[in-house]
């Protein structure tokens, strides 16, 4: 999969050099390019923002640098699916990650300040698929941290990125329930015992216990997941 990230803070994406994602890049499973939006400014101050028409607080990202940056990505025969992270987007879920993991090419546009001039979205949508996606109901200062989360959630679903593919099967959100609690050695720690059933060797009983734990945990922490 090819991934492009456009940002005014390229250094923010450095964690993508690390761990499983970094290894996947070195193995050629991920072809990641980070671009500095300011490369597409032409004034001495490399200006990317300006005051909002109509007034109001904060600054808005100017359309021209974004237009140029996106032109560069659409110059060839194929175009990326453009993802714009933002608190006003559609919720990014495990299903979103599964869908996006099927795409050959994703580009992420990181907004800052109060957002990007709306015409950038309109014009981009005439040339490529565009999705505005939110991580949740809270506000981050910019899209960069959201891109780190989204890229990790997507990339780990690509075959070969995670060593043990079985670990993708039994995890939270894979089938609409949260994960069961897990334990490892020692069998007693600070006076606390591992649930006896896990030491029983009875795999059927263990599976039933784990399923019940998932239901209880989901009801306690995420009742919204059970109600539909
Ligand atoms: Cl995807 N971006 C920003 N800037 N803030 C957010 C978010 C995304 N998701 C929740 N808050």
Image: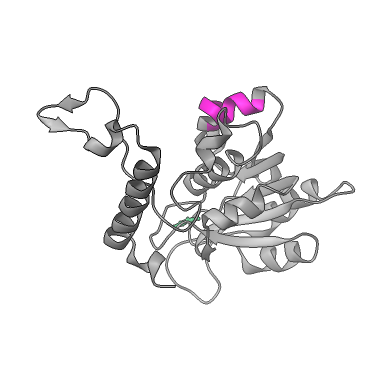
Part of the protein shown in magenta: 16-25
- Position of the N terminus, as image quadrant, is top right
Q: Nearer the viewer, residue 37 or 165?
A: 165
At horizontal 68% and vertical 52% (from top left) the residue drawn is 65
> Compared to 81, does 187 lie above or below?
above
Residue 138 in the figure: left or right of residue 104: left
Q: Is residue 20 magenta?
A: yes
Residue 170 in the figure: left or right of residue 126: left
Q: Position of residue 53 (x, y in %)?
A: 56, 73
Q: Position of residue 156 (x, y in %)?
A: 57, 38
Q: Is residue 21 magenta?
A: yes
- Position of the C terminus, as image quadrant, is bottom left
> Compared to 46, does 54 lie above or below?
below
Q: Position of residue 205 (x, y in %)?
A: 34, 44
At horizontal 60% and vertical 42% (from top left) the residue drawn is 157
Where residue 124 sits, quadrant-wise, is bottom right
Q: Nearer the viewer, residue 125 or 172?
A: 172
At horizontal 22% and vertical 33% (from top left) the residue drawn is 194
Q: Position of residue 3 (x, y in %)?
A: 68, 41
Q: Is residue 48 visible?
A: no
Q: Is residue 130 visible?
A: yes
Q: Main secondary structure of the magenta part?
A: helix
Where residue 116 sits, quadrant-wise, is bottom right
């Amino acid at each position: 999969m090819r991934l492009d990230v456009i940002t005014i803070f390229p250094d923010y994406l450095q964690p993508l050099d690390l761990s499983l994602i970094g290894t996947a890049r070195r193995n050629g499973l991920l072809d990641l390019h980070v671009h500095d939006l300011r490369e597409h400014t032409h004034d001495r101050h490399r200006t990317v923002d300006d005051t909002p028409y109509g007034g109001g607080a904060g600054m808005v990202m100017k359309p021209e640098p974004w237009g140029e940056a996106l032109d560069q990505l659409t110059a060839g025969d194929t175009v990326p699916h453009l993802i714009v992270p933002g608190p006003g987007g559609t919720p990014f879920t495990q299903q979103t990650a599964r869908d996006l993991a099927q795409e050959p090419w994703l580009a992420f546009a990181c907004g800052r300040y109060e957002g990007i001039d709306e015409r950038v979205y309109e014009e981009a949508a005439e040339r490529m698929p565009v999705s505005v996606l939110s991580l949740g109901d809270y506000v981050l200062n910019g899209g960069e941290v959201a891109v780190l989360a989204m890229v990790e959630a997507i990339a780990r679903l690509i075959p070969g990125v995670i060593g043990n593919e079985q670990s993708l099967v039994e995890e939270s959100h894979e089938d609409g329930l949260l994960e069961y609690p897990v334990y490892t050695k020692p069998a007693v720690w600070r006076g606390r015992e591992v649930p006896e059933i896990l030491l029983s060797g009875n795999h059927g009983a263990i599976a039933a216990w784990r399923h019940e734990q998932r239901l209880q945990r989901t009801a306690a922490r995420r009742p919204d997941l059970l109600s539909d």
